Amino acid sequence: MSRTVKKNVTVKSRTKALIGNFRRCTVKDVHPHIKFIMADDNVHNWYFMMGAMVDTDNRGEFSGDNEEFLKGQFFGKITATKVYPFGPPDVEMLTPTGVFPLNNNDFCIDIGKYHKDNYPATLGMDGYTKMIWSGLVGWRDLGYGINLISGHRKNKQVEMIRKASFESQAYNRKNNAALVELFRGTEEQKKEEKKVSRKKKVDLVDPVVELTKDTEQLKIEAPKSPRKKVRALKVYKKKNNDNL
C-alpha cells in the first residue's frame, strides 16, 4: 500500500523547518562540495553551488574517475513545495552538467516527484541536494530516468560531462553572474569571520606567563584553556610557596 503524502503543512511550520535546516547545513553540517544560499525574499527558495568554489580549479573527490568533473562548478535552485517536508522539493540545474537537464525541474530520481512514496520527510533540503550530488558523481549508475541525459554511450557521455565541467565557470560568469557574486561574497565573509575568531582566541590566552622571584625569572607555558591556565598557576604557587 502506498503512503499518503500529508498536505496539511502550515506555512509557519514549513518556514520554521526550512530556517532550521538552513542553519544546520551552513553552520553545523557543512558539505565539503556543496554551498547554500537562501533567497532574501523567500525562505522556500535556496540556491546551491556544487563542485569548484568561485574562480578555482576543483581536484580531489569531486573530480570524477576520469577527472570529468575537473573545474566543474554547478549552480542550481531548490524550492520547497507546498507539501514539504512530507514531499520532495523541486530542483533545477542552472548550469549544464551533462547529467541533469538545464533549467528544468521535471526529471526523475528515485526519491523525486515521480517516486514521492520513497521520499523520507526527515531528509531536508540539503539532504535532497546531496542526493542530486550523489547522482551527479555516480552518473554511470543513474539509469535512464525521465529527462536525464543518460541515453548516450558511456564514453560519449563522459566527454559531454568533461566539456560541461570545463566550460561551467565561464558559463556561470555569463549566465549566473549574480549567483557568482553572492557565493563569492559568502566565501569572503566566512574567511573574515575565521580571522576574527582566531584573533579572539589569541587575545584570550597569553602564550607565556612570566613570574619573577628575586633575581630568578621563571616562565610557564600557558595551557590553551584559561581554566587550565589558572590551575597551572596554583600548582606553581604551591610548589614554590609563592604568595603572589
Image (cartoon, rainbow, N blue to C red):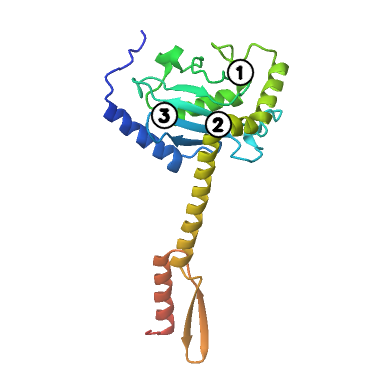
Task: Name the residue type under label 1.
Answer: Asp
The amino acid beneath tag 3 is: Asn
The x, y position of residue 209, in whole percent, is 48, 76
Q: Mark 3 points at which residue?
A: 45
**Residue at 68%, 18% in the rendered image:** 157
Would you say the residues marked 2 and 3 are in contact, meaning their CB atoms lie under 8 Å apart?
no
User: Tag on residue 164?
Assistant: none
Assign a secondary structure to mark 2: loop
Q: How far apart are marks 2 and 3 (CA)?
A: 16 Å
Q: How far apart are marks 1 and 3 (CA)?
A: 29 Å
**To which quarter of the image does residue 38 belong?**
top left
Q: Earlier in the sequence, mark 1 or mark 2?
A: 1
Q: Could you say which is closer to the camera, residue 201 or residue 186?
A: 186
Q: What quarter of the picture does the N terminus occupy? A: top left
Q: Mark 2 points at which residue?
A: 176
Q: Is residue 145 left or right of residue 46?
A: right
